[in-house]
Amino acid sequence: MLQQTQVARVIEFYPRFLQRYPTLEDLASAPADGVRESWGGLGYYARARNLHAAVRRIVAESGGRVPQSPVELARLPGIGAYTAGAVASLAFGAAVPAVDTNVARVLGRVFGLRGAAQRSRRMRRVWVLAAALVPPRRAADWNQALMDLGALVCTARAPRCPVCPVRGVCATRPRVEERGRAGAARAFPRSGALRSPRT
């Protein structure tokens, strides 16, 4: 549900969805139309179809046991690199990165990654960098902190550099201070240029 949707919006739907489908087996055995109906109003209905298909595969092939590795997770319908990393680290504690748009923006700014002409190459660099930074323990906390930093402080249009905990090592901050708040957005790589091709 959180793919391309803010937490505040998901909070309305998540409890109702879990009440209707409390177990993977309940969701797997539900008719596709019912799953789509329970997703009504949340948008991006391909996510509901993919979730349903993924859960059916998990129940059929592994008795309802959710895969723990990002490689296995990425084989399920609708799960790309970011979602696989997020589930593996947040749910199972795997020391793997989870690079969403917010994390890509933070890393791109802190390390000064630029070059709009080479978007895919830069995104590969972001993933390699993210993997190198994940601590062997508490990967879930690390990934969540990076996501929150991008969502709340290192925002796309109005970054809050004075309160940023990594401002002392940020490669982009000096350009922001030089240009002033009005020029802040131009000092940063465009977030769209750092988007993963499959999330």
Image (cartoon, helix red, strand yellow):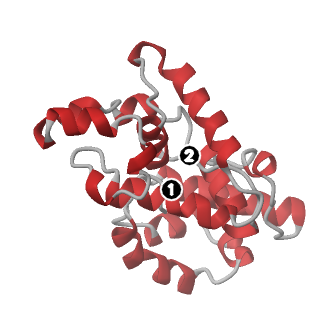
* Quadrant in the picture for the C terminus: top right
Tell me, for residue 99, which label it has, or none: 2
The image quadrant that residue 29 belongs to is bottom right
Residue 93: percent from the left, percent from the top? Answer: 75, 66
Per the model, the C-alpha gap separating discs 2 and 1 is 9 Å
For image coordinates 37% across by 33% down, the residue present is: 192
Q: What residue is rendered at 39% in x and 18% in y?
A: 116
Instruction: Say which of 146 and 62 sits in front.
Output: 146
Residue 191 visible: yes
Q: What element carries label 1?
A: helix
Q: Which residue has dot 1 on it?
A: 146
Residue type for callout 1: Leu
Q: What element carries label 2?
A: loop
Sequence-wise, the earlier of marks 2 and 1 is: 2
Residue reaching furthest front? 168
Could you classify mark 2 by the number of other residues whose Cα lies within 10 Å: few (under 14), some (14-19), or many (20 or more)? Answer: many
Pick the front one: 105 or 34: 105
What x and y, as percent, mark residue 100? 50, 47
Outermost residue on the left side: it is: 182
